[in-house]
Amino acid sequence: MFNLILLDMKVNVQSVNFNADQKLIDFTQKKLDKLEHFYDKVIFADVYLKVQNTSAKENKITEILLSIPGGDLMVKKTCKKFEECVDECVNSLQRQLIKRKEKLSTHA
């Protein structure tokens, strides 16, 4: 008998020009974990949260580098809030992963 253990993907969060609180890091981890429902071969995610020194209201930048076999996926969004950026990045990555999976299944 085998026990199946699902491990969370490794998520590295780096904040630039500010200190990210644990709530934001946990939110980001939770959102990225959902990507494994669409593509189970994700190796790790590098997340860069930056505050741009500007007078514009949309000064939060989120970049996510998702490492998967065969190449990495990269998305970058600028928003008013980091949670909004993370949501948009994850939605974009989700679409890319579904496309990648469809491509692999048609070539298999």
Image: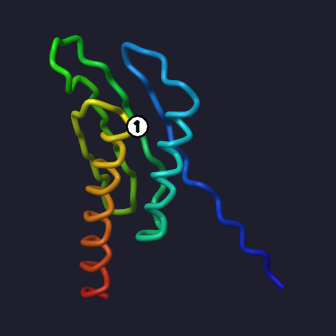
* Quadrant occupied by the C terminus: bottom left
Taking the view exactly as shown, the residue that stands out farthest to the right is 1
Q: Mark 1 points at which residue?
A: 47
Which residue is drawn at the image coordinates 28% and 27% (left, top)?
60
> Looking at the picture, does residue 32 appear above or below residue 100?
above
Which residue is drawn at the image coordinates 55% and 47% (left, top)?
10
How crowded pointer 1 is (Cα within 10 Å; few <14, some 14-19, many 20+) is rated as many
* Quadrant occupied by the N terminus: bottom right
Which residue is drawn at the image coordinates 32% and 41% (left, top)?
84
Rendered image quadrant of residue 86: top left
Q: Which amino acid does label 1 sit on?
A: Val
In the picture, measured across the screen, residue 26 lies left or right of residue 54, that is: right
Callout 1: SS: strand
Q: Give how far across and how far down residue 25 sits, in percent.
A: 52, 35
Q: Give how far across and how far down residue 71 sits, in percent.
A: 30, 57
> For the image shown, how many numbered marks are present on the structure?
1
